Image (spheres, coloured by chain):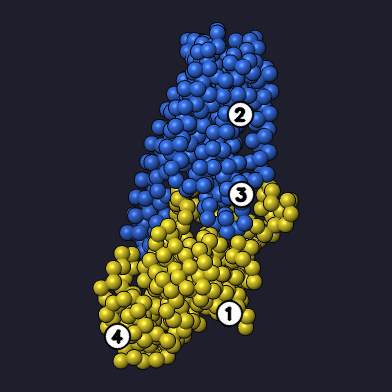
Chain colours: A blue, B yellow
C-alpha cells in the first residue's frame, strides 16, 4: 500500500508539505477561472496562452530572471493580443492562437538551448514538478490567488453576464470588451499558477476538467466554482499521494485522475438525463401533461 | 405627445450590402408600434440601430433625447433567439437579475452582489409576466413559451421607458402568442412598445400603428395598407380575401379585417406572411 508511506513522509518531509500546499493553491485558480473557460468555450484559447508562456519562461531563464515572472508577462501579453484581435475583427482568432501556441514554444526552446545547464528545466516547465516548489514561489502563488479572488468576487455579476450573453450585457451598460480582456488576463494568471504543479502542456486539463465535472452537477457559476475548487484540491492531493511511493511524475498522475473522473461523471450525468427524459415521457402518457420539456439535455 | 424615438435619413449597410436606406420614423410616447416586412427587410437591423448595437453609415437616431448608446439602459430588449446556450448552468432568477445591471450608482453600485431590492424587482417582474413559479428553475428546462416570459421579465426588471421585442412569438404556439400579446397590451399602458413581426394579421389586433419596412419605410399607419402597398412590401402578387376576423383565444377586437395572403415569397422560418389593414374592407 503506497498511501501510508505518503502520509508518514508528509508528516516529516517539508518538500512534500510544500507540494501539497502548491496543489491546493493551484486548485483555487482552477475553481475560480475554470468555470468561465468551460461555459465560454475558450479552452483552445487558454491552451494557446499556456503554450506561448514557454517563450517568456525561456527568455527569463536566459536573462537570469525568475521564470515564473517571465511566464506571467508572456501569458498576459498573449491574452491581450488574442483578445484584442477577437474584439477588433470578430473572427480569425483561432489562427492567431495556433500561431502564438507554436511561436511561443519555439522562442522558449531557442532561449533554453542558449542557456547552459538549463536543459533539465525544460521537462519541469512542460510537465511540472510539484515536488520542487520553493517557499518563495508558494508566496507568489498565494499572491496570484488573492488577486484572482478579489477580482472575481468584486465583478462576479459582470463576468457572469459577459459569459452568458454579451449582447444583453452591453445593453445594460457593462463594458463588455474590458471584462472580456480582464477574463483572459485571469486565465493567463491561472495558467501561470498551475505551471509549477502540472506543467504548461497539462494546464489545460486542470483548467477545464474539474470545472466541466462541476458543471454537470451544479446550477450556477458560483456553485461550479466551489465544486471545481474542491475537486481540484482532491485531484492534486490524491494525484500527489498516488504518485509518491511508486515514484511516478505527479503532474501526469493528477491529469489522468482528472480525466478518469470526467469520464465517469459524464457517463453518470448522461444516464441521469436519459432516466429523467424517460420518466417525463411516461408521466405525459400516464396523466395528461408532465413537465413537458422538463428533462435537461445532457451537458 | 412627444417623440421618444426620432430617426432621420438613416442608412445602414453590412460591408457591400445596403440593408436600410432613407429611413425616417418618429415614434411617440405611449405608442404600440408593429414593425413588419419580409425576411431580410431590415427589421432586426433597425432595432439594433435603435439599441446602439450598430452604428449607422448616415442619418441620425435620437432615443429619449439622447444618442442610442446613452439611452439604452432605459430600453428593454427581448431578442428573437436567446443568445446563450441552453445548457448554461444558471437559474431563472439569475438570468432576470442581469436586467438589473447598470441600475446601481457609483463604484459601490457596480461591485459585489445583487442587492435585496434587485431580487425584489425580479420577483415583481416574474409575477407581472405570470412566471413567478419559474424563479428557481434551470433555464435548460424551460419550454419555448416559458423562456419567452423569462426574457420579457429580464427586459422589464430594469424599468424601461421603451420595450423593444424582435419576433417575440416566433418559436411558440398560437395560444401562447395571444397570451404574450395580451400581456404587452397591458404593459403598453405605462411604456412605449415596438414589436417586430412577420404577421400583420395577428398584431393588427393589438398595435396602435404599423410600420412596414423593406429596405426603407413604405408606410406608417395601419390605415394605409392596401394591395399596392403589400405588393411593394413583399414584391409579389397578392390575393386578398375579406372576412370577419376573430381570434381563437378571444380578446376584444371584433371589427372587420381584410386579409391579404402573399404567395410565392420564400419564407424559410415563418409561414406565408399575412397582411391586414385595420378598419377598412378591401375586396
| Mark 2 Cα-neighbour bin, 10 Å: few <14, some 14–19, many ≥20 | some
Q: Secondary structure at mark 2?
A: helix
Provide the chain ID for the residue under circle 3: A
Q: Position of residue B270 (x, y in %)?
A: 34, 68
Q: Which residue is mark 3?
A: A158
Q: Which residue, given by chain and number where applicable, does mark 2 sit on? A: A73
Q: Which mark is residue B28?
A: 1
Viewer-proximal residue among A198 and B283: B283
Separation of residues labelled 1 and 2 (CA atoms): 54 Å
Q: CA distance from mark 4 to mark 3?
A: 51 Å
Question: Does the residue at mark 1 contact the one at mark 4 (Cβ under 8 Å)?
Answer: no
Q: Percent from the top left, x then y, of residue A57?
A: 56, 21
**Callout 3 and callout 1 share a chain:** no
- Marks 1/4: CA distance? 31 Å
Query: Which quarter of the figure has residue B172?
Result: bottom left
Chain identifier of the residue bearing label 2 in the image: A
Picture coordinates of residue B265, whole percent (x, y) = 28, 71
Quadrant location of the N terminus of chain B?
bottom right
Query: Which quadrant does the C terminus of chain B fall into?
Result: bottom left
Amino acid at each position: 500500500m503506497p498511501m501510508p508511506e505518503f502520509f508518514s513522509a508528509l508528516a516529516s518531509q517539508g518538500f512534500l508539505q510544500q507540494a501539497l500546499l502548491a496543489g491546493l493553491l493551484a486548485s483555487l485558480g482552477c475553481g475560480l477561472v475554470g468555470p468561465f473557460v468551460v461555459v465560454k468555450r475558450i479552452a483552445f484559447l487558454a491552451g494557446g496562452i499556456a503554450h506561448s508562456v514557454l517563450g517568456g519562461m525561456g527568455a527569463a531563464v536566459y536573462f537570469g530572471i525568475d521564470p515564473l515572472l517571465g511566464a506571467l508577462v508572456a501569458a498576459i501579453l498573449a491574452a491581450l493580443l488574442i483578445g484584442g484581435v477577437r474584439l477588433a475583427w470578430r473572427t480569425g482568432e483561432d489562427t492567431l492562437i495556433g500561431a502564438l501556441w507554436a511561436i511561443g514554444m519555439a522562442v522558449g526552446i531557442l532561449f533554453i538551448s542558449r542557456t547552459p545547464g538549463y536543459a533539465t528545466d525544460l521537462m519541469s516547465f512542460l510537465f511540472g514538478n510539484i515536488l520542487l516548489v520553493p517557499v518563495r514561489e508558494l508566496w507568489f502563488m498565494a499572491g496570484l490567488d488573492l488577486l484572482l479572488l478579489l477580482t472575481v468576487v468584486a465583478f462576479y455579476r459582470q463576468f457572469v453576464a459577459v459569459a452568458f450573453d454579451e449582447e444583453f450585457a452591453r445593453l445594460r451598460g457593462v463594458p463588455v470588451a474590458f471584462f472580456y480582456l480582464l477574463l483572459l488576463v485571469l486565465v493567463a494568471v491561472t495558467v501561470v499558477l498551475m505551471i509549477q504543479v502540472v506543467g504548461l502542456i497539462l494546464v489545460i486539463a486542470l483548467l477545464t476538467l474539474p470545472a466541466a465535472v462541476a458543471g454537470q452537477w451544479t446550477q450556477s457559476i458560483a456553485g461550479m466554482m466551489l465544486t471545481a475548487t474542491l475537486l481540484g484540491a482532491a485531484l492534486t492531493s490524491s494525484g500527489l499521494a498516488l504518485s509518491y511511493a511508486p515514484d511516478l511524475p505527479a503532474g501526469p498522475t493528477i491529469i489522468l485522475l482528472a480525466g478518469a473522473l470526467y469520464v465517469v461523471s459524464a457517463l453518470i450525468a448522461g444516464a441521469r438525463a436519459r432516466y429523467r427524459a424517460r420518466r417525463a415521457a411516461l408521466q405525459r402518457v400516464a396523466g395528461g401533461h408532465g413537465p413537458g420539456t422538463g428533462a435537461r439535455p445532457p451537458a | 405627445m412627444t417623440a421618444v424615438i426620432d430617426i432621420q435619413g438613416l442608412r445602414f449597410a453590412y460591408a457591400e450590402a445596403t440593408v436600410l436606406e432613407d429611413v425616417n420614423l418618429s415614434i411617440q410616447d405611449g405608442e404600440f408600434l408593429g414593425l413588419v416586412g419580409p425576411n431580410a427587410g431590415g427589421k432586426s437591423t433597425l432595432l439594433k440601430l435603435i439599441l446602439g448595437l450598430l452604428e449607422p453609415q448616415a442619418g441620425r437616431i435620437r432615443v429619449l433625447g439622447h444618442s442610442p448608446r446613452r439611452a439604452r439602459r432605459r430600453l428593454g430588449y427581448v431578442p428573437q433567439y436567446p443568445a446563450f446556450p441552453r445548457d448554461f448552468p444558471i437559474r431563472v432568477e439569475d438570468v432576470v437579475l442581469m436586467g438589473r445591471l447598470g441600475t446601481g450608482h457609483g463604484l459601490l453600485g457596480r461591485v459585489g452582489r445583487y442587492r435585496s431590492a434587485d431580487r425584489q424587482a425580479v420577483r415583481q417582474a416574474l409575477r407581472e409576466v405570470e412566471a413567478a413559479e419559474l424563479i428557481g428553475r434551470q433555464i435548460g428546462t424551460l419550454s419555448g413559451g416559458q423562456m419567452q416570459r423569462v426574457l420579457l421579465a429580464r427586459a422589464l426588471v430594469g424599468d424601461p421607458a421603451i420595450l423593444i421585442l424582435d419576433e417575440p412569438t416566433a418559436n411558440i404556439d398560437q395560444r401562447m402568442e395571444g397570451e404574450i400579446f395580451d400581456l404587452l397590451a397591458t404593459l403598453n399602458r405605462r411604456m412605449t412598445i415596438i414589436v417586430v413581426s412577420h404577421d400583420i394579421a395577428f398584431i393588427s389586433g393589438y398595435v396602435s400603428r404599423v410600420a412596414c419596412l423593406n429596405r426603407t419605410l413604405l408606410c406608417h399607419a395601419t390605415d394605409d395598407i392596401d394591395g399596392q402597398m403589400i405588393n411593394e412590401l413583399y414584391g409579389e402578387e397578392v390575393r386578398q380575401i375579406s372576412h370577419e376576423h376573430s381570434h381563437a383565444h378571444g380578446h376584444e377586437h371584433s371589427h372587420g379585417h381584410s386579409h391579404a395572403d402573399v404567395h410565392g415569397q420564400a419564407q424559410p422560418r415563418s409561414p406565408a406572411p399575412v397582411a391586414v389593414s385595420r378598419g377598412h374592407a378591401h375586396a
